[in-house]
Image: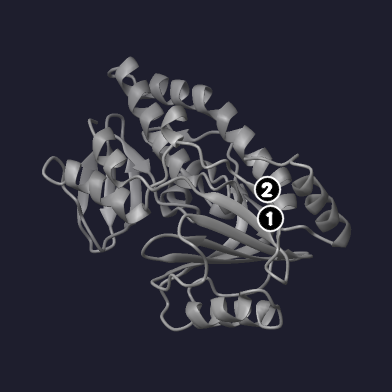
Amino acid sequence: MGLVDAVHAKALPPRGFEFKDADDATLGSIGSGADPAANERYEIHRDDLLEILFDALSDQIDVLFSQSIDQLDEGSDLVSVTFNNGDRRDYALVFGCDGNRSNTRKLAFGDGDQFTYFMGGYFFLKVVPQIGLLPANKSQVFSVPGRMAMLNGYDDRTDIGFGFRTDGEIDYDYRDRAQQRRLIHDHFHALGWKVPAMLACAGGDDDFYFDRLNRIRMPCWSRGRVALVGDAGYCVSPLAGFGGSMAIIGAGRLADALERHPGDHAAAFRHYEVGLRPLVEEVQERAATTGLAMMFPADEIELAERDRRLATGEIDF
């Protein structure tokens, strides 16, 4: 798309990742701070990436805001889409790129929860303008059995993250933001380290992310003229730290498949899935095993083993 230079211009410096104890001593660290350009890996703020993509496309496509799809009706050569404002439009293909709780997936494949695999916990993330919680270009994690507090420091903002394990899914309204804030406070208010300051910074407005830790696993990512991309079809969970990257990779693979099979969307969708599924399954498995044990140790034994592996340098990203 000719956007690499724009991404490079907004790329963030490499960051170190530190694991802390209650006294803020470093138990171990990950990341050498080497130049990421050597491996063509870049970190970029989500808002910066969205602006780059939108600026590249806004004069080429119609963008409809504040609308969602109410109904999909597929014919032999098109899909008729009814929006929630009553408008109806016809499209050759429909791509669901609408996230973990994808409405497109539900409309095209049925009840979305049949493809959702709960991983035994919940995750909260909020971006705040405070920058005094840790140095810029550092990430820090504090863990106790079943709970985790995380900070990502930047020059102009800080990510505040909390995660906790549960034996089963908890009963909450995923649209009730006040209830979600109470859940985080109830699980973390008694912890030390930087947690009290983090809770103070994370209060207030409702601009945050909270959801269960889960993977989306589907036997097929397409049906007819509808295909899914990113979290909608194969959410790898926040533990992977790879959701945005996987969406970009998936979109690129799908575009390549459509170029390889012009006029044959069924063949293109098969090519897209056969080529990408091994990577998706590898990342999902790593998040469910290594990711959980590293970020969310379940008990004292698992926590001690993680700390031992950190001390001996056996853990790396």
Provide the residue designation for mark 1. 295
Q: Amino acid at mark 1?
A: Met
Q: Is residue 133 left or right of residue 157?
A: right
Q: Position of residue 102 (x, y in %)?
A: 45, 53
- On the image, the x and y values in percent for residue 91 come to 24, 39
Instruction: Give the label on residue 241, or none.
Output: none
- The kind of residue on which mark 2 rests is Gly
Q: How is the image coloured?
A: one colour
Left or right? Give the position of 292 relative to 69. Answer: right
Q: Callout 1 environment at 10 Å: few (<14), some (14 to 19), or many (20+)? A: many
Q: Is residue 56 above or below residue 64?
A: above
Specify the farthest residue to the right.
Answer: 301
Instruction: Pick the quarter of the image with the N terminus.
Output: top left
Residue 181: % across, % down: 55, 79
Instruction: Tell me if 308 is positioned left or right of 74 in this view.
Output: right
Q: Secondary structure at mark 2?
A: helix
Q: Are marks 1 and 2 in contact (CB under 8 Å)?
A: yes
Q: Which image quadrant: the C terminus? A: top right
In this orientation, which residue lies closer to the viewer: 220 or 76? 220
Identity of the residue drawn at 24% across and 51% down: 51
Residue, disc 2? 291
Please tell me in which quadrant of the rendered image residue 227 appears. top left
Q: Height in image: 136 above or below 232? A: below
Between 151 and 18, the one lying in front of the other is 18
SS of the residue under disc 1: helix
Cα–Cα span, label 1 and label 2: 6 Å
